[in-house]
């Protein structure tokens, strides 16, 4: 099967990859909305979507009631409603940009997923090959560069709506993105400083990060979540803000902005914004799993290759290896999507000034201090400095943490 794929014309491969991305992202967006409704219902102790049932399924004895309780037909009804509902175009909007904004929102969502490896397999030479649509050596840089373009769709939607609430939503989105993009970028730099030895050709490949977490040894097999917990926390909080999820949904806060940037939108164009939001959430969870949770390795210090080797299916069955790696990776991603929904339905929304203060006064200094700490630690290891250097670094870290996390006086707030 691998040889058949490699023998296809590059244009055919690109076309099939594009179709695959669309066929994966759109259903995942719909399933994400259904999961959100079921999880929110469970957390609030109320029945979730469990009523819709087509008449031809009413007489199916077991499957019909099961799918009804699962809420699958609500998802189909929602999708059909968005497709066939009248797509109104208000007369006071800038029509070109108003229509272009939801399309622009989908471009980063469909592009970033191509640079995210979602599994791997062993080739005939025993080498691990990533399962990724575009295996870029600058993978994390490409994800950051393209995903940051998504905010333009919110700004354009807010401006083109020619209404004050959408405009305020667009302004909030741009300010929030700048505030948290810096912290997110700085939080991943220690990871790449750590995996790239000084003096060698550096790489920003996400696959290389997973490979480093698959090595034998105490530090080699450690997931970066345990080796760099501050980086993981800063990245995760910034990811919530970048995806506009509660408690950071300032761009669409219905309590003070009605619907924010999408107040004037409805039907299919409204649906595109939310498919894009779920796609960003899925891609962001995947990047977090690759950077900090070992990718497709089931446990720390226990790579998938070794587990399947014990079962005798590592090198002889590349397809089984690939399927197992995809399953492990997806389980981790689904867990973080659940975390996104869990937080949304349990944590109250911040005020806008609190979002800004958290980004600029806490997360950004913490990300800068974390980068300096790991740069110093790498220098101490490479230069073989003694215990005195580690003690000095520990004391400097304690002082810096106290300065960053100390409670502020009411006058300063």
Image (tube, rainbow, N blue to C red):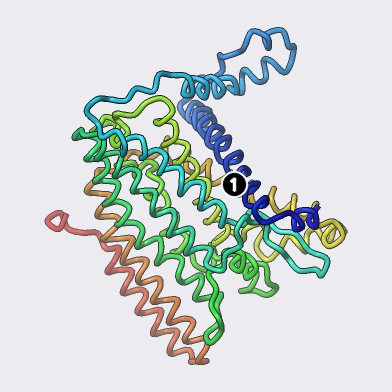
- Please indicate whether residue 174 sits to the left or right of residue 29 in the image: left
Q: Is residue 372 above or below residue 100?
A: below
Q: Position of residue 304 (x, y in %)?
A: 73, 60
Residue 161 picture quarter: top left
Please name the residue shown 62% across and 55% down the image: 133
Q: Position of residue 265 (x, y in %)?
A: 34, 29
Count of picture labels: 1
- Residue 298 visible from this viewpoint: no
Please name the residue shown 69% across and 48% down the image: 327
Residue tagged 1: 18
Q: Is residue 261 above or below residue 67?
A: below
Q: Check disc 1 and report its element: helix, strand or loop.
A: helix
- Residue 143 visible from this viewpoint: yes
Please name the residue shown 72% across and 18% down the image: 63
Q: Position of residue 252 (x, y in %)?
A: 31, 37
Q: Is residue 288 above or below residue 383?
A: above
- Which residue is nearer to you in this view: 329 or 25? 25
- Which residue is nearer to you in this view: 274 or 369? 274
- Image quarter (top left, top right, bottom left or bottom right) of the C terminus: bottom left
Residue 366 picture quarter: bottom left
- Which residue is nearer to you in this view: 260 or 372? 260
- Please indicate whether residue 143 sits to the left or right of residue 210 in the image: left
Residue 170 picture quarter: top left
Please name the residue shown 26% across and 61% down the image: 361
The 10 Å Cα crowd at callout 1, few under 14, some 14 to 19, many 20 or more, is: some
């Amino acid at each position: 099967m691998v040889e058949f794929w490699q023998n296809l014309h590059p244009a055919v491969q690109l076309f099939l990859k594009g179709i695959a991305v669309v066929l994966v992202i759109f259903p995942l967006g719909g399933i994400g909305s259904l999961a959100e409704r079921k999880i929110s219902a469970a957390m609030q102790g109320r029945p979730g979507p469990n009523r819709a049932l087509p008449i031809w399924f009413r007489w199916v004895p077991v499957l019909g009631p099961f799918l009804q309780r699962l809420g699958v037909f609500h998802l189909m009804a929602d999708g059909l409603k968005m497709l066939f509902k009248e797509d109104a175009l208000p007369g006071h909007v800038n029509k070109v940009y108003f229509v272009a904004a939801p399309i622009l929102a989908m471009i980063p969502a469909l592009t970033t997923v191509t640079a995210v490896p979602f599994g791997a397999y062993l080739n005939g030479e025993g080498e691990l090959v990533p399962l990724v649509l575009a295996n870029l050596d600058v993978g994390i840089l490409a994800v950051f560069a393209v995903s940051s373009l998504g905010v333009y769709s919110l700004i354009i939607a807010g401006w083109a709506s020619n209404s004050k609430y959408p405009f305020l939503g667009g302004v909030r989105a741009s300010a929030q993105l700048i505030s948290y993009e810096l912290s997110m970028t700085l939080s991943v730099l220690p990871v790449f400083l750590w995996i790239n030895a000084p003096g060698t050709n550096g790489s920003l490949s996400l696959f290389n990060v997973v490979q480093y977490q698959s090595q034998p040894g105490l530090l080699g097999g450690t997931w970066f979540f345990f080796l760099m917990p501050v980086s993981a926390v800063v990245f995760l909080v910034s990811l919530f803000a970048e995806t506009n999820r509660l408690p950071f949904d300032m761009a669409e806060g219905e309590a003070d902005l009605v619907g924010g940037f999408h107040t004037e939108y409805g039907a299919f164009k409204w649906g595109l914004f939310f498919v894009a939001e779920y796609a960003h959430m899925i891609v962001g969870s995947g990047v977090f799993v690759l950077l900090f949770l070992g990718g497709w390795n089931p446990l720390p210090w226990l790579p998938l290759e070794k587990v399947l080797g014990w079962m005798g299916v590592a090198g002889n069955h590349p397809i089984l290896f690939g399927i197992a790696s995809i399953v492990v990776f997806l389980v981790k991603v689904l867990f973080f999507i659940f975390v996104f929904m869990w937080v949304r339905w349990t944590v109250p929304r911040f005020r806008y000034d609190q979002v800004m203060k958290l980004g600029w006064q806490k997360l950004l200094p913490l990300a800068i201090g974390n980068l300096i700490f790991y740069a110093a630690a790498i220098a101490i290891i490479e230069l073989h400095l003694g215990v005195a250097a580690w003690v000095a670094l520990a004391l400097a870290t304690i002082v810096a943490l106290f300065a960053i996390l100390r409670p502020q006086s009411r006058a300063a707030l």
